[in-house]
Amino acid sequence: MAVPPIRRADELTRLHWVAVALAAVTGLVHLALGVGALPAPLGFASLLAAGGFAAGIALLLAGIYRRVVLALGIPFTAAQILLWYLLNEPTSLGDVSPLAAVDKTVQPALIVVLVALLYRSDGGA
C-alpha cells in the first residue's frame, strides 16, 4: 500500500477550517460530558467520541487520506446524533441540556460541511 502524500495545512480552504471548528466544538462537548459522566460507560463512550473528533481533525490538518477522513466523518457524526437520540429519548426542548443543544446544532452543520467538502470539484483536497 502506498504512503499517502502529506499535504500542508496551508492548502486548507475556509470551508475546511469551518469543519475543523465545528469538529472541535463537538469534540470538546463530548470531552466535557465524558469527564462529567465517568466512571459510567456513557462517560467512556463520550470520551471515545471526543477522541474520534480529535483524530479526524489531526488527520485533516496533516492531509493524510483527507478524502477518506471527510467521508468517514459523515457517518461518524451522524451516529453521534442517532445514539444521543436513542439514549436520551428527548420529547421536548426541556429534555435537552444546553451542552446537548449546542452539540446537536453543531453536528448537523458539520455533516453538511463535510458533504460539501467531499463533493467539491477538487475532492476536498
Image (tube, helix red, strand yellow):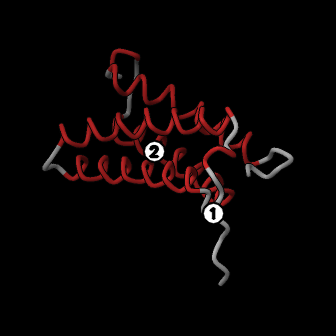
Q: Say if mark 1 contacts mark 2, CB within 8 Å.
A: no
- Distance from label 1 to label 2 (Cα)? 29 Å
Q: Which residue is mark 1?
A: 6
Q: What is the x, y in percent for residue 94?
A: 34, 15
Marked residue nearer the N-terminal end (1 or 2): 1
Q: Quadrant of residue 12?
A: top right
Q: What is the x, y in percent for residue 109?
A: 60, 30
Residue at the (63%, 53%) spot, across then down: 8
Q: Residue 25 versus residue 86: which sits nearer the camera?
A: 25
Q: Residue 21 versus residue 95: which sits nearer the camera?
A: 21
Residue at the (79%, 52%) spot, across then down: 123
Q: Using residue 98 as the reference point, say whether residue 106 is left or right of it.
A: right
User: In the figure, 6 relative to 52: above or below?
Assistant: below
- Residue sitting farthest toward the top: 94
Quadrant location, the N terminus: bottom right
- Residue sitting farthest toward the right: 121
Residue at the (42%, 49%) spot, across then down: 54
Q: Residue 42 versus residue 1: which sits nearer the camera?
A: 1
Label drawn at residue 80: 2
User: In the figure, 123 relative to 113: above or below?
Assistant: below
Q: What is the x, y in percent for residue 70?
A: 64, 52
Q: Indicate the secondary structure of the residue bearing disc 1.
A: loop
- Frontmost of labels 1 and 2 is 1
* Amino acid found under the numbered disc labelled 2: Gln
Q: What is the x, y in percent for residue 61?
A: 56, 50
Q: Label 2: few (<14), some or many (≥20) within 10 Å? A: some
Total labels: the figure holds: 2
* Amino acid found under the numbered disc labelled 1: Ile
Q: Quadrant of residue 2?
A: bottom right
Q: Indicate the secondary structure of the residue bearing disc 2.
A: helix
Q: Label 1: few (<14), some or many (≥20) within 10 Å? A: few
Residue at the (45%, 44%) spot, across then down: 80
